Image: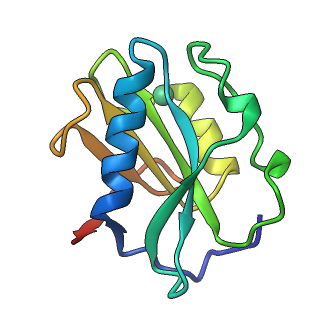
Amino acid sequence: MVHLTNVKIRGIERECLDTIKEGAKSVHPREFIALLSVGDDKSIISEIVMLPQMMSGKRHATFNIYMAPIDFSIVGTVHSHPSGNPTPSDEDLISFSKNGIVHIIIGYPYEDDTWRAYDYNGKEIELEVID
Ligand SMILES: [Zn+2]
């Protein structure tokens, strides 16, 4: 994980958001979890990266971003809240502070209006959806 504190993430590609929605739906009522990766311009999230240890499907699966392959394009995490409430838990806030600069939580039913993005402090941030 590279230090990306001076990198500003401004958006997420529509296709990537759709992948997250589909992923969350496919494992519901278990929790979906993946890493977020930016494209060449380093400001738009364009891909998610799934790690084998994230596939356990346990509630609040924990992972360490340092187990990820060396990939400097990884900027944060995404996970689902099958409860429907996209507010970070205390556990999430600890994980956010350690694992990157942008974090998405998508709540059931995993649609365009049920996700939120947060920075490493757990403060809600705006991400533009790029078509
Ligand atoms: Zn959570």
Number of numbered discs overlaid on the protein picture: 0
Q: Quadrant of the N terminus?
A: bottom right
Is residue 126 in view from this perspective? no
Percent coordinates x, y for residue 80 in the rendering: 42, 30
Q: Residue at x 79, y 51 (%)?
A: 68
The residue at 76%/67% (across/down) is 71
Image height check: is 100 above or below 8? above
Looking at this rendering, what residue extends furthest in the left direction? 113
Q: Locate residue 99 relative to residue 101 in the image: left or right.
A: right
Quick check: 99 left or right of 81? Answer: right
Residue 24 locus on image (x, y percent): 39, 30
- Residue 83: percent from left, percent from top: 32, 15
Instruction: Please identify the quadrant where the C terminus is shown.
Output: bottom left
Q: Is residue 54 above or below residue 71?
A: above
Q: Is residue 12 left or right of residue 91?
A: left
Residue at the spot 38% in from the left edge and 47% down from the top edge: 19
Check the image and tell me how it is coloured: rainbow
The picture places residue 29, in percent across and down from the top left corner, at 40, 11
Residue at x 71%, y 40% (from the top left corner): 51
Q: Is residue 22 visible?
A: yes
Which picture quadrant has residue 62? top right
Q: Nearer the viewer, residue 87 or 15?
A: 15
Please, is residue 82 above or below residue 119 in the view?
Answer: above
Work out whether 89 lies above or below 106.
above
Looking at the image, which residue sits at the far bottom? 41
Nearer to us in this view, 99 or 61: 61
**Residue 33: quadrant of the picture:** top right
As rendered, which of 57 and 97 lies closer to the eye? 57
